[in-house]
Image (tube, helix red, strand yellow):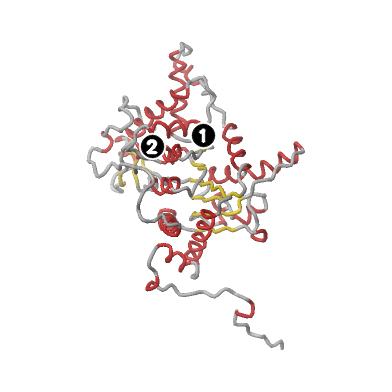
Amino acid sequence: MHKRHLHDGREDKLVPLKSLDLDEVDSFASLLRGMSHTAFSGRSLGEAFEIMVAMAKDPDCKVVMTLSGAMTIAKMGKVIQKMIDEGLVHAVVSTGALMAHGLSEAIGLTHYRYNPEVSDEELFDKGYNRVYDTLEMEANLNHVEEFSTKAMEMLGPQKELSSEMICRALGQVLAEDTDGGGVLRSAYLKNVPVYVPALTDSELGLDLCTWAMRHARKRGEIKTPMDLFNVVPRYNPFHDLISFARFALGAKKLGIFTIGGGVPRNWAQEVGPFVDITNDRLEESFRPPRYHYAVRICPEPVHWGGLSGCTYSEGVSWGKFVPASEGGRQAEVYADATTVWPLLIKGVLEELGKGDGRRSRPSLRGPGPSRSGPKQTPRSATKPAGRPGR
């Protein structure tokens, strides 16, 4: 019978674990670094911390943040702002809903806790749109529509638009309020492009459509009510694709920080394959952009087969990421972002010497515990006539 030679780990150069000693923790950064020597999701979060710090300290790296899920209605908007304000992010790819809910907050409106004793039918009647355990007022979205109309009027009805152009215009309008805040305001002031690949799947897309309908009616093109649904806005998403490709090609290194998955994540990651097939089909020789650093926070496991569960190693097979064998660094944290994202970024800011609570520009003026909620007047718009819920 074969006699085993029992190893102790050291001879095989295994990395030893260390018990997390809270007596040695004196900051968020030291907590995260200690967690990197533990196990399970704690270790993953600690590894994500090390990669985030490396991304931030690498002068050649441009970082793309992709966002899905209801993160602004979940009150993570200021975390996104802080990342932009402190230079941790150089481009944003997001769902349109996340940006629309962020506009509600940015113009001084309120989101509320959902009371599970109230039925969804009653919520609809009252104009309360439920997002898990939180409520977005339909009246809030009325305010956002008037605000977004102001931004689109700046661009003009004859200009062929893209989500990047619309988000920049929204940020510009927000920036007119020197005491204001908001994700798009920070992005505008920091010259960070914001892309919404699935714009039509959002309040912003619906606002663009009704804005175009209104202009068509003013031009006398609407003879019957159904003619409104023949109006197609001058919108071309390929402006976004080309703009983002140029951004990626202009970076010496790329990093990606992802919350969730979905269209924003996949759209941002397809830039490598896009350049690969451009080289192949057009006989060019561009250097394909691959993500050297990558951090993702998402609770969805791999085995469901959804895009949100796609691993980075799988992405290597598509030419989206630099493999570990060539120096690529990736960390995937399987957790609800609202529980670990603030901790992670607070630790990174501390490590970079930016964690003392000071802000690089005036912060968002929060709505506070106002009882008037949906009846508030936002700072940058007046309340339009009501509309039915959707």
- Residue plotted at (42% across, 46% down): 71
Q: Secondary structure at mark 2?
A: helix
Q: Position of residue 353 (x, y in %)?
A: 42, 57
Q: Considering only vertical position in the picture, is 295 above or below 176?
A: below
- Classify residue 331 as left or right of residue 31: right
Q: Residue at x 61, y 39 (%)?
A: 245
User: Is the C-beta separation of discs 2 and 1 under 8 Å?
Assistant: no
Say what secondary structure mark 1 lies in. Answer: helix
Q: Return the residue found at the far left.
A: 371
Q: Which mark is residue 103?
A: 2
**Amino acid residing under circle 2:** Leu
Residue 153 on image: x %, y %: 43, 23
Q: Nearer the viewer, residue 68 or 86?
A: 86
| Quadrant of the drawing holding the N terminus | bottom right
Decide which of tag 2 and tag 1 comes sooner along the chain.
2
Count the marks.
2
Residue 313 in the image: state x and y as whole percent.
63, 57
Is residue 134 left or right of 204 when viewed as pictured? left
Would residue 345 be found to the left or right of residue 9 on screen? left
- Relative image position of residue 80 (x, y in whole percent): 43, 47
For label 2, count other residues whose C-alpha is less than 10 Å away and answer few (under 14), some (14-19) or many (20+).
many
For the point 47% across and 24% down, the residue is 155
Q: Amino acid at mark 1?
A: Glu
Q: Quadrant of the C terminus?
A: top left
Disc ID at residue 86: none
**Label 1 environment density (alpha carbons within 10 Å; few <14, some 14–19, many ≥20):** many
Residue sitting at the far right: 283
Q: CA distance from mark 2 to mark 1?
A: 15 Å
**Rendered image quadrant of residue 311:** bottom right
What residue do we see at 52% from left, 55% from top?
A: 57
Residue 164 numbered tag: 1
